[in-house]
């Protein structure tokens, strides 16, 4: 693997349900450097469960951007004033994207609040990342997650045609359910952060979903970066397709 790849799904911070041993921005950059990754889209784990996610994002946004990375702000569409706050997320925090957590915050991807936030985000040039899952749903003794109905996502895409979306932490079998709808729309990509549950997952997914819609995402430090990189190494796909997944598809999404 060569240098210059992008990581569309990575984080800094701590996690309230288990120990994150290497959660700083310095740790993330060191892991990226080791594996030939020079940029990406970074979110803040701390802010996911804050009453006001903006407070957590405010602590790290400048640091992330000063390191040459893109910043994804945490947004909960169900909180009052979220639509208005997008202007500060864009102009004060300097975010490139917003990251939604429907499984953690308990809402459907096609509800009116999400559509309103996503539409306004598109008007501001903010990309919208939909995080399908953060932890195994079976770990409900720690906290209760709401399973995300991926079949509702195409409705959101159609409601906000001028907004770019990334479906993050989605598993291959969930992609297959909506693959035709994703292929038919030019404002959506998916990341690889949850492709570890199936051998040769990239090969399987690209048989149903255009490789131009797939971007590399590690899920680090919640997930193993090395494990996700093996998806790109253990594949029969051509080198030019791997290059698109690891680098240029992300640039198409984030531009």
Image (spheres, rainbow, N blue to C red):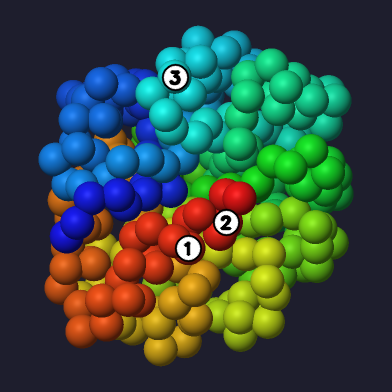
Q: CA distance from mark 3 to mark 2?
A: 21 Å
Looking at the rendered structure, the secondary structure element under dot 1 is helix
Q: Residue at x 43, y 48 (%)?
A: 8
Between the residue at mark 2 and the residue at mark 1, the CA separation in whole angstroms equals: 6 Å
Of the numbered discs 3 and 2, the one sitting upstream in the chain is: 3
Q: Left of 91 or right of it: where is 210?
A: left
Rendered location of residue 138, percent (x, y): 36, 51
Q: Decide: marks 2, 1 in contact (CB < 8 A)?
A: yes
Label ID, residue 238:
none
For label 2, the crowd category at 10 Å Cα-Cα, with few meaning under 14, some 14 to 19 and many 20 or more, is some
Q: Quadrant of the N terminus?
A: bottom left
Q: Is residue 130 left or right of residue 173?
A: right
Q: Give the class, few, some or many, for how many residues have Cα within 10 Å of label 1's Cα (few <14, many ≥20).
A: many
Residue 168 is at least partly visible in this image: yes
Return the residue at label 2.
253
The answer to whether residue 198 is above or below residue 73 is below
Relative to 160, residue 105 above or below: above
Q: In whole angstroms, how far apart are the C-alphas of marks 3 and 1?
A: 23 Å
Front in this rendered view, residue 14 or 1: 1
Q: Which residue is mark 1?
A: 249
Q: Position of residue 117 (x, y in %)?
A: 79, 41
Mark 2: secondary structure: helix
User: Front-most of 81 and 161?
Assistant: 161
Label 3 neighbourhood size at 10 Å, few (<14), some (14-19), many (20+)?
few
What's the mark number on residue 66? 3
Name the residue located 48 percent from the left edge and 63 percent from the top edge.
Answer: 249
Q: Residue at x 47, y 87 (%)?
A: 208
Tally the numbered discs.
3
- State left or right for residue 65 relative to residue 221: right
Q: Residue at x 74, y 36 (%)?
A: 77
Earlier along the polypeptide chain: callout 3 or callout 1? 3
Q: Nearer the viewer, residue 136 or 169?
A: 169
């Amino acid at each position: 693997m060569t240098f210059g790849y992008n990581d569309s799904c990575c984080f800094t911070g701590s996690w309230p349900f288990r120990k994150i041993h290497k959660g700083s921005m310095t740790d993330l950059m060191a892991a990226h450097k080791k594996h030939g990754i020079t940029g990406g889209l970074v979110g803040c784990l701390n802010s996911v469960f804050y009453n006001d996610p903006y407070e957590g994002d405010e602590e790290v946004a400048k640091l992330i951007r000063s390191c040459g990375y893109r910043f994804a702000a945490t947004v909960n569409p169900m909180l009052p004033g979220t639509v208005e706050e997008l202007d500060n997320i864009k102009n004060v925090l300097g975010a490139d994207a917003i990251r939604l957590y429907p499984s953690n915050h308990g809402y459907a991807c096609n509800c009116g609040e999400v559509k309103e936030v996503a539409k306004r985000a598109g008007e501001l040039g903010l990309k919208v990342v939909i995080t399908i899952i953060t932890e195994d749903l079976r770990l409900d003794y720690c906290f209760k997650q709401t399973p995300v109905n991926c079949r509702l996502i195409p409705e959101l895409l159609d409601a906000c045609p001028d907004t770019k979306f990334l479906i993050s932490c989605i598993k291959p079998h969930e992609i297959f359910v909506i693959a035709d709808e994703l292929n038919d729309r030019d404002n959506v990509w998916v990341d690889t952060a949850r492709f570890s549950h199936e051998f040769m997952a990239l090969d399987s997914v690209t048989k149903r979903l255009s490789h131009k819609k797939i971007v590399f995402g590690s899920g680090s430090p919640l997930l193993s970066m090395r494990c996700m990189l093996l998806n790109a190494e253990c594949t029969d796909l051509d080198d030019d397709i791997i290059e698109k997944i690891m680098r240029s598809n992300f640039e198409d999404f984030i531009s």
